[in-house]
Image: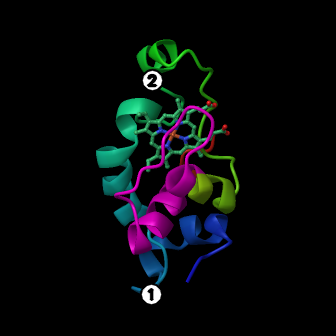
């Protein structure tokens, strides 16, 4: 269920079977649950970084596991986003990879 190859998924999103992670579906999850803090392009919302006194690294190049852990367990000053589970989790991970510059 947990896909380790986000790059491949990114390339074939439109052709991926329904069960596979979908970056396209993940975009909606990202917009709803991550964008306020991480910005539309994943570079980080400067106001949030300032409020939380933290340097936010751009999203995209983290491993699947690092992203998953950040969402389910939190990382540093980021609290877990408990409302993202199951397929949404895989989808948003796939989407985060598309933010890589
Ligand atoms: C309330 C604001 C907030 C929300 C919502 C949020 N994050 Fe974060 N996130 C942060 C902050 C702040 C950090 C930096 C934490 C630190 O370094 O102490 C961070 C760090 C991360 C990191 C680690 C980056 C790195 O390389 O160090 C990942 C991955 C991440 N977030 C993914 C996500 C995803 C995916 C979502 C949506 C499901 C999300 N975050 C929602 C605030 C947020």
Q: Residue at x 44, y 21 (%)?
A: 48
Per the rendered image, the range of residues in magenta is 70-95
Residue at 49 percent of width and 68 percent of height: 90
Query: Circle 1 is placed at which residue position?
Result: 17
Residue 60 in the magenta stretch? The answer is: no
Q: Quadrant of residue 1?
A: bottom right
Q: Mark 2 falls on what kind of element?
A: loop
Q: How is the image coloured?
A: rainbow
Where 3 sits versus 6, above or below? below
Q: Which residue is mark 2?
A: 45
Which residue is at the front of the view, 54 or 24?
A: 54
Q: Residue at x 70, y 56 (%)?
A: 63
Q: What percent of the width, then of the height, locates residue 101? A: 63, 39
Q: Looking at the picture, tell me which residue is in the foreground, 39 or 51.
A: 51
Asked if labels 2 and 1 touch by Cβ distance under 8 angstroms, the answer is: no
Q: Nearer the viewer, residue 48 or 97?
A: 48
Judge: label 2 CB < 8 Å from ligand 1. Answer: yes
């Amino acid at each position: 269920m947990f896909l380790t190859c986000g790059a491949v998924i990114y390339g074939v999103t439109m052709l991926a079977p329904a069960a596979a992670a979908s970056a396209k579906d993940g975009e909606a999850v990202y917009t709803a649950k991550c964008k306020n803090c991480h910005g539309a392009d994943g570079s980080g919302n400067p106001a949030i970084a300032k409020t939380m006194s933290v340097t936010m690294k751009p999203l995209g190049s983290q491993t699947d596991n690092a992203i998953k852990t950040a969402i389910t367990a939190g990382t540093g000053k980021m609290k877990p986003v408990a409302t993202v589970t199951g397929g949404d989790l895989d989808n948003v991970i796939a989407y985060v990879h598309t933010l890589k510059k």
